[in-house]
């Protein structure tokens, strides 16, 4: 089987590229599984280690974001010049090892440092994958392929919630970290054996004729070219504003279900896992499908689709947070969970087309730097800090009001995406 895959790896067509995409999705699933598992485990960790919501927010956001964002650009620079598959293999092994190490933490600082280590590994797990997909799939299918890759977000988040909660309930929270970390270490060599490095730019064809392999990325000046484009900054800040709310709400919803709805660890694992999986997969695919369909006629649609999705998500989230009916809450959360992820395919595709093929990893890393430094670094801590601030007045309901306040970031995101849509055509690189 491996030999057959290797023979197929020399070309982008056939079933091989879908096998590559499937493995990339699996790696991204572990990326988010290891990233989001802390949310469902926050309750038992807080109880055993005696932590505050602010400390949990720091571990869920800043501890991860510091190195994840800081190392992302130099690693992507290397990925534009060296083997992306080797970089991703090393990244997967690193973040999986640190995830397992979280299970042995004895206090706040030990767990904080382990989460920083997870961020170090995951810094090399996304931008090279975006570039690989762009070299395996033609332009007409790229937004959908990138959206399919982004299935790793809802699937990984759902599995982190589900497995983390169930293992913690059956054994303890430490076993949950060790189990998922070891599973990632097993996947790393399989990924390296199966996935081969494609020619850069091989999927960019003109009337069916493959263009020559893209030259190496320029040693300097490439990032400066990207940063001069106003659409890049608008897209990055728009995505970051949405991620402040998206990452923050995703991290704190398990605690909200415990405090405001009185759900047990197992019940909230099943409840939130189902919402994240079903709503997330539908939303990611819908966004990619709309992006390819509408973007072919008008490039602005790649950014107008997420702008509309966030404006629809806001009232749905507000209603969902306000209900006390579990049945109604399930369906109300399902809609904004999907809309919250609809931006991934079209926006990532737009970022890929702000630069030539040989700079796509670097462009993706620059985008992820802004998006995750603010989204991850600020979002999770923001909701925890506001919850601590409001606790003297609202008690266990403080988290509900903290989430209300964070929904305003969706408005900021929608406005920035709409402005960026007007400038995208000027900065687009075919």
Image: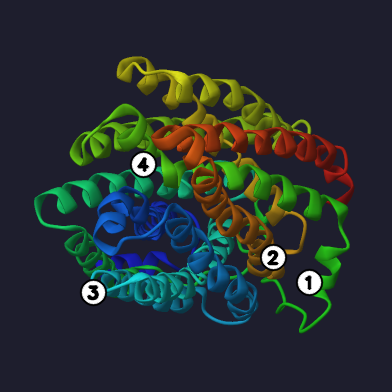
User: Horizontal placement of 1 versus 113: left or right?
Assistant: left
Which residue is the site of mark 1?
Answer: 223
Q: Position of residue 87 (x, y in %)?
A: 48, 77
Task: Evaluate if marks 2 and 1 touch, with contact meaning CB atoms under 8 Å apart.
Answer: yes
Mark 3 or mark 1, which is nearer the start of the sequence? 3
Q: Disc 2 to disc 3, how far (Cα)?
A: 33 Å
User: Could you say whether the residue bearing mark 1 is in a helix, strand or loop?
Assistant: helix
Q: Is residue 322 visible?
A: yes
User: Horizontal placement of 313 versus 155: left or right?
Assistant: right
User: Horizontal placement of 304 versus 139: left or right?
Assistant: right
Residue most toward the left? 170
Q: Disc 1 to disc 3, how far (Cα)?
A: 40 Å
Residue most toward the front? 392
Counting other residues with Cα less than 10 Å from the Cα at mark 4, is it few (<14), some (14-19), or many (20 or more)?
A: many
User: Could you say whether the residue bearing mark 2 is in a helix, strand or loop?
Assistant: helix
Q: Disc 1 to disc 4, how far (Cα)?
A: 40 Å
Task: Evaluate if marks 2 and 3 touch, with contact meaning CB atoms under 8 Å apart.
Answer: no
């Amino acid at each position: 089987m491996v030999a057959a895959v290797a023979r197929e790896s020399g070309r982008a067509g056939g079933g091989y590229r879908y096998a590559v995409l499937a493995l990339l999705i699996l790696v991204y699933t572990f990326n988010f599984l290891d990233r989001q598992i802390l949310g469902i485990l926050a309750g038992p960790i807080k109880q055993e280690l005696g932590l505050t919501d602010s400390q949990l927010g720091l571990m869920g956001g800043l501890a991860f974001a510091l190195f994840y964002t800081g190392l992302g650009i130099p690693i992507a620079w290397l990925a534009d010049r060296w083997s992306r598959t080797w970089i991703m293999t090393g990244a997967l092994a690193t973040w999986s090892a640190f995830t397992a190490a979280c299970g042995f933490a004895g206090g706040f600082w030990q767990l904080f440092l382990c989460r920083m280590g997870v961020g170090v590994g995951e810094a090399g797990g996304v931008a090279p994958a975006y570039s690989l997909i762009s070299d395996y799939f033609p332009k007409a299918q790229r937004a959908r392929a990138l959206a399919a890759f982004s299935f790793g977000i809802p699937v990984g988040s759902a599995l982190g919630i589900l497995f983390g909660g169930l293992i913690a309930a059956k054994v303890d929270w430490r076993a949950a970290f060790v189990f998922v970390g070891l599973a990632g270490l097993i996947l790393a060599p399989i990924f390296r054996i199966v996935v081969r490095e494609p020619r850069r730019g091989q999927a960019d064809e003109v009337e069916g004729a493959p263009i020559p392999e893209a030259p190496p990325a320029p040693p300097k000046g490439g990032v400066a070219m990207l940063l001069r484009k106003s659409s890049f900054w608008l897209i990055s800040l728009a995505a970051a504003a949405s991620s402040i709310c998206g990452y923050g709400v995703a991290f704190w919803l398990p605690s909200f279900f415990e405090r405001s709805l009185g759900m047990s660890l197992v019940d909230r694992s099943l409840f939130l896992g189902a919402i994240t999986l079903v709503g997330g997969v539908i939303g990611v695919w819908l966004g990619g499908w709309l992006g390819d369909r509408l973007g072919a006629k008008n490039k602005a649609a790649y950014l107008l689709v997420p702008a509309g999705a966030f404006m629809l998500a806001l009232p749905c989230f507000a209603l969902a947070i306000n209900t006390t009916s579990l049945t109604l809450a399930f369906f109300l959360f399902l809609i904004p969970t999907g809309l919250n992820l609809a931006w991934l395919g079209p926006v990532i595709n737009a970022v890929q087309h702000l630069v030539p093929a040989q700079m796509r990893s670097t462009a993706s890393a620059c985008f992820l730097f802004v998006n995750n430094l603010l989204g991850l670094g600020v979002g999770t801590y923001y909701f925890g800090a506001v919850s601590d601030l409001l606790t003297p007045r609202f008690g266990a309901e403080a988290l509900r009001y903290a989430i209300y306040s964070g929904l305003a970031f969706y408005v900021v995101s929608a406005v920035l995406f709409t402005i960026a849509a007007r400038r995208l055509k000027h900065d687009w690189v075919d």
